[in-house]
Amino acid sequence: MAMDLDVLHVFPSFAPGGIQMRLKAITASLPQTWSHTVVALDGDYSAFDTPGWSSRVSPTAAALPQVSERGLVGRLRAIAQWLQRQNPDVLISNNWGAIEWGAATNFVRGLGHIHTESGFGSDEAFTLNPKRGWFRRIALQRSDSILLCSQTLVKIAREQWRLPEHKTQFLPDGIDLQRFCVDTATPMDLNLESGRVVIGCVAPLRAEKNLTALLEAFDQAWQRNHSLFLAVAGDGPEQSMLEAYAATLASSASIRFYGFLSHIERFFKAIDLCALSSDTEQLPNSVLQGMAMGLPIAAFAVGDIPLMTAPENRPYLPPRRDVAGLAAAFTALASDARKRDEVGAANKTKCASTYSQAQMAQAYKIVIEHALRRMRLAA
């Protein structure tokens, strides 16, 4: 019989995003006797507005500790006191923005702790901040596990942050293979004339996604092949700038921004290849989704993208910021439907065997139970 367990999840923000949707997927498969409380440090809990959340997951009802006018020691003390009052069994802190909550667990006896890292913002797209690496090394001393969603992050954690190898674990995100199934999804109507080859990109419209490079590469490819069409799904702070830039391109009539889409599997069913132009990635969810839907991937070779895609896909992954190389990948895949099918089928097989949601949820269950056992032994 499953034990009762209270898990506290701390996020810098709980606006809709990859790690928030990961929590939704994980908690749907974890034991029903476990309860999950979410802390959003910026007060934004809007990810709960998306459908499909388990009734066992809820935002915290407690006021958060006041830390804005305190130094580091004062902040950690206030967080530790708050955690002692709430008394969860296990705390999971997510990303750099929640690292001080991970550090505070050093001062709370009998609390299991797991820290996750999913990637970097534009401020660390090219060069990592050594002070942050040093602080992680201090903050995560007594953590039970440190979960990294990419093999690239595992290497960074062990070699640059110098975190213990026995605590750092590669735990990739998983995909809902029933939802992202090309055989059952209904294609979204993109309102295009027949004969178009659709390049689709799903990404938040933020600086580190470098979507100007996507637009430039598409424009170069379109000038060789006017049947190409670029469909961009997602929203974010750069939307107005990107739309204005797209309007200056020769291919502007073949570019459309669709905004945030809740049924993104329908978008993937309507496109012919999946594109990404990020400066930094780890294990991008949109690439997993495209792979699950049997699509080839044309993207810069950043993070784990060359490792997560099938070997057949590697020729279409130019180096970071190689706009001409990305345009060439678009052109090559757009001109050969058979090649798209071959590469897409290989990606689908790789995704199903390695990146299923069921595998991810089971791995999280094992890690959480391990943290609980260690906490009880220490107590």
Image (tube, grey):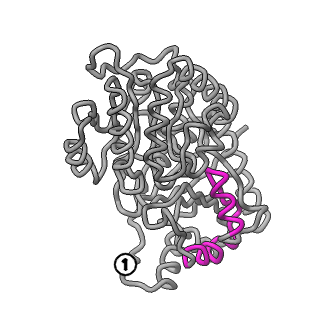
Residue 249 position within the rendered picture, expressed as x and y whole percent measured from the top left: 24, 42
Judge by depth and name the residue closer to the eye, 321 or 224: 224
Left/right of residue 111 with respect to residue 341 in the rendered view: right
- Label 1 amino acid? Ser
Query: Can see residue 35?
Result: no
Q: Quadrant of residue 357?
A: top right
Q: Is residue 156 one of those drawn in magenta?
A: yes
Q: Quadrant of the N terminus?
A: top right
Residue 342 position within the rendered picture, expressed as x and y whole percent measured from the top left: 60, 21
Left/right of residue 131 with respect to residue 240 in the rendered view: right
Crowding near the residue tagged with mark 1, few <14, some 14–19, many ≥20 C-alpha atoms within 10 Å: few
Q: Would you place residue 124 above or below residue 48 in this image? A: below
**Highlighted magenta segment, given as a residue range:** 131-159
Q: Would you place residue 149 above or below residue 358 in this image? A: below
Q: Identify the residue under disc 1.
A: 68
Q: Main secondary structure of the magenta part?
A: helix
Query: Can see residue 64?
Result: yes
Q: What residue do we see at 34% from left, 20% from top? A: 196
Q: What residue do we see at 52% from left, 56% from top? A: 9
Q: Quadrant of the C terminus?
A: bottom right
